[in-house]
Amino acid sequence: MLLITCPWCGPRDEAEYHYGGQAHVPYPERPADLDDEQWAAYVFYRDNPKGPFAERWTHSTGCRRWFNVLRDTVSYEVLASYRLDAPRPELPQAGGNR
Amino acid sequence: MTAQPLPEHPDFLWRNPEPRSSYDVVIVGAGGHGLATAYYLARNHGITNIAVLEKGWLAGGNMARNTTIIRSNYLWDESAAIYEHALKLWEGLPAELDYDFLFSQRGVLNLAHTLQDVREGVRRVGANRLNGVDAQWLAPDEVAEVCPILNVSPRTRYPVLGATFQPRAGIAKHDHVAWALARRADAMGVDLIQGCEVTGFLKDGDRVVGVETSRGRIRAGRVGLAAAGHSSVLAELAGFRLPVQSHPLQALVSELHEPVHPTVVMSNHVHVYVSQAHKGELVLGAGVDSYNGYGQRGSFHVIEQQMAAAVELFPVFARAHVLRTWGGIVDVTPDASPIVGTSPVENLYVNCGWGTGGFKATPAAGWTFAHTIATGEPHPLNAPFALERFATGALIDEHGAAAVAH
Ligand SMILES: Cc1cc2nc3c(=O)[nH]c(=O)nc-3n(C[C@H](O)[C@H](O)[C@H](O)COP(=O)(O)OP(=O)(O)OC[C@H]3O[C@@H](n4cnc5c(N)ncnc54)[C@H](O)[C@@H]3O)c2cc1C
Ligand SMILES: [Zn+2]
């Protein structure tokens, strides 16, 4: 089970949260200008990296707020969690045990 | 009913050749789908200058990890057609491949626990019948006749209000299916190459002309991807995106028991499905983990919920022990239907997105993908499953009939 830190409530079991998929996917700035391919990209296509991934979680049985998590999709290590208005944290390039 | 002995394990099933420098067709991934594709390329299209490249060992991915349920009771016409084609092929495959992989048509029950489940189930039975798929709607007492150990008492938390039943559905020994296909493909000249990871693509403009591998460059006239959970990783290397997300899906088995469970029971609502393997293990599956992952292991709380549901449905399991748990990585699409067809890169073809349910499709996936690779055009059965549907909006929304929560 993952141990995820809610920015407001602190570290809690994964089972308290719900997953929301990829983070930092902005709504199109000029929706009226999008063609079908571009809408498909916005609605259906998400990154699926092997390694660090910025994703959204909501603390559904706690404060019910949404936030972002940086998690490694291979080791399942939670590398960082941060509020929605914060930028994606930089990770050290190599080594270290975060 | 008695427990069945497994077929003898033959000591020699395929050669282990060195990769050659070029092939007419290179298939990436020696799971069931890659092997079936190679088999049907040779059998149906006479193309035998083929290599199937596998980064690990043959059929060690989801093919070795799935719970082997085979059925064709899907809702939409497009899905019913391709899964029913698969089921018909399954019915003839043991004889055709001359290999008894214990395909056992013991039927599948998909339980309904809510009024909405009942309506969805009755609708699906109607849709199945119109598509020539065997299907019945059973009331709780009829469900208990099919599976006497199932608790259909109205006093459970989520009582069984009925079930769809497909009598021709069943299970098979997955490893043996892979070995049977591998043996025949090999005999027809296909090179099955294990320990050979595809790490890049050789391209000439917009056209693929080969692959980079951990064992060197291999040129290819055409390349077919059958890499399940890793399809989007490979697509990215080839320069395009796929609308798939990789999720861990896990299963577990108990120790051996006397034969007690005569069919396959699936419940979408309480998230458990159970069959009894030929040797006697209870085989239990659940839903996917919610998050993306490549780690080939699943979350413990999923097991907890799945066991609670199993014990309520099957009180007789209360003292069974879990012997083994494991996970696979499945590639899930937004409409819970696969993607089989051409890609934005010329001569590169994709077979992916089968998610939690691709084992049952193995022969049809191979049949249609082989057709697509051989002719450059989709087969009528896989034409609706093209990548383009995400832009045209012609989705095949099978979340309801996919039967595993994701
Ligand atoms: C726990 C679990 C239960 C399931 N239960 C069922 C079920 O009851 N019924 C059902 O119909 N389906 C079920 N499925 C789904 C089914 O297993 C998959 O849909 C199906 O196996 C996918 O096709 P495949 O067999 O070719 O995939 P795989 O067997 O995963 O084959 C893909 C292969 O590609 C290889 N590969 C990946 N990347 C590379 C690379 N770069 N180079 C070379 N090789 C590569 C992998 O090592 C792997 O062997 C289940 C899956 C899981 C995990
Ligand atoms: Zn919180």
Image: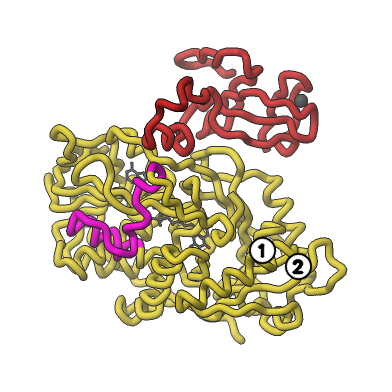
The residue that disc 1 covers is B267
Q: Which chain is red?
A: A
Residue that lies at the very extreme toward the right in this rendered image: B155
Category of crowding for the residue at label 1, using alpha-carbon neighbours closer than 10 angstroms: few (below 14), some (14–19), many (at least 20): many
Say if residue B329 shows up in the picture: no
The amino acid type of the residue labelled 1 equals: Ser
The residue at the point 48 percent across, 48 percent down is B330
The residue at the point 28 percent across, 44 percent down is B343
Vertical placement of residue B265 versus A54, above or below:
below
- Local secondary structure at mark 2: helix
Vertical placement of residue B332 versus A64, above or below:
below
* Quarter location, residue B316: bottom right
Instruction: Tell me the chain of label 2.
Output: B
The amino acid type of the residue labelled 2 equals: Leu
The residue at the point 49 percent across, 50 percent down is B335
* Quarter location, residue B119: bottom right
Vertical placement of residue B199 versus B377, above or below:
above
User: Which range of residues does the magenta coloring cover?
Assistant: B365-391
Do circles 2 and 1 both sit on a common chain?
Answer: yes
Instruction: Tell me the chain of label 1.
Output: B
Estimate the x, y position of residue A15 in percent, counting from the top left: 73, 39
Q: Is residue B373 magenta?
A: yes
Vertical placement of residue A59 versus B72, above or below:
above
Pointer 2 with pointer 1, Cβ within 8 A = yes
Which residue is more in the foreground, B119 or B225?
B119
Whether residue A84 sits left or right of residue B148 in the image: it is left
Colour convention of the picture: by chain
The residue that disc 2 covers is B313
